[in-house]
Amino acid sequence: MEIREEIAELLKEVTTFRQDLHQIPELGLQEFKTCQYLKATLASFGVKEVYEVLETGLVAVFRSDKVGKTLAFRTDIDALPVTEESGVAFTSRHKGRMHACGHDGHMATMLGFAKYLSEHPESIRGTLVLIFQPAEEGPGGAQLMIEAGVLEKFGVEQIIGLHLFPEFDEGVIACKKGAMMARNGEVTITVHGKSAHGAQPQQGADAILAAAAIIQGLHTIISRNLSPLDSAVLTFGQISGGEAMNIIPGKVELQGTMRAFSDTVYNTLTSRINTLATEIAKAYDCWAEVTFNHMYRVVDNDEKMVEALKAVAGDSYVTSPPYMLAEDFSLFQQQIPGLFFFVGIKNEAKDYIYPLHSSKLRFDEKNLLGGIQCYVDLIEMLNQEGA
């Protein structure tokens, strides 16, 4: 994909935006410094129509006399509770906080896009709504923005977003029609038994033994309750219980994540987890309490919008495989047609190979220009008949 000269000229400023924002990472719904930086930068471009949402979120609006759709472009703005080890000169100034998922790059892309629109109003058609969304990493800022009315207020018809992705080489634009990222949820199983001395197990009900059986039993769901043609993940990453090595514990807690590419499969998971955990616990004279936190939905890309992206990306486009990662952009797609795509940042020669959420994540800001170019070209492409 060729980067046009007027977009290539944004590199220095986009680099500054990214590196400035990288130094002030903030967790979800606490992005006060980030919001002020974004607001001040938009003001420096002369953007008149900027609205504050949820205290730390922003919406910037560009309007044109040209007939066109109302398109929204979304960036996430929050960071992660990660201690940075990237070694960059512009490292995080907030201890234990880092932009380890590329959101600093997403914001810099959006600011570069906003600057381009400010300097090239002739490229605007209809109404463009730029959404700076807090709390993607949790607790789901997209839903909060929806509930605040950002789509309804401006009559948004379609929404576009992107994510930097270290599994694709620099210069690659990757996407997939339909389900590209998974629906996800969290499950907590509390196993209640009866405490006893370890030397007298017959006087208790062993919650650890029951919990172990539950974990083993739940992993049969994937192989025996789902079609071999369906994909799902169930992972328990935390287990806690017990007070001493010679005491049978009366309570054990399991915490895990569950993911699937369809609501049908996801609902089967929840139903079987509840049934199996409850019944297996009974077999050990225990009882299980099962709770779910249903989080994000399937990132389900609109087919016509993906075709538009393929057209603008040209030979830079590749078809992405589906990923079990989750994204709250999917909540916007529950409301209106949406397009979410990946921008490659991997460069093995420069050691830009670390995965998302890594404390060592690094990338070259030049890759952000590809995102800006796609955004600019999608304005025209999505306003063509049938798009």
Image (spheres, rainbow, N blue to C red):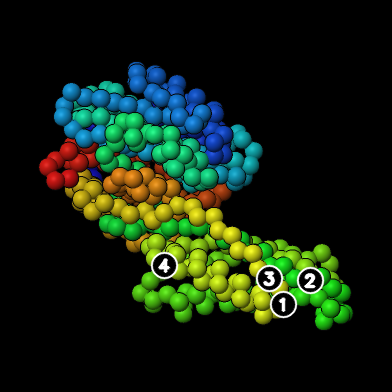
**Which of these two is toward me, 165 or 34?**
34
Could you give the CA–CA distance between mark 4 and mark 3, rounded to whole angstroms? 26 Å
Asked whether the residues under the numbered discs 4 and 2 touch, taking CB atoms below 8 Å apart as contact, a structural biologist would say no
Asked whether the residues under the numbered discs 1 and 3 touch, taking CB atoms below 8 Å apart as contact, a structural biologist would say no
Name the residue beneath numbered marker 4.
Answer: 265
Could you give the CA–CA distance between mark 4 and mark 1, rounded to whole angstroms? 30 Å
Q: Which mark is residue 227?
A: none
Name the residue beneath numbered marker 2.
Answer: 194
Determine whether, in the image, residue 99 is placed left or right of residue 260. Answer: right
Q: Earlier in the sequence, mark 1 or mark 2?
A: 2
Determine whether, in the image, residue 96 is placed left or right of residue 89. Answer: right
Could you give the CA–CA distance between mark 1 and mark 2, rounded to whole angstroms? 9 Å
**Which of these two is toward me, 162 or 181?**
181
Q: Is residue 372 visible?
A: no
**Quarter of the figure with residue 112:** top left
Q: Is residue 339 visible?
A: yes
Q: Earlier in the sequence, mark 3 or mark 2?
A: 2
Crowdedness of circle 2 by 10 Å Cα count: few (<14), some, many (20+)? some
Frontmost of labels 4 and 2 is 2
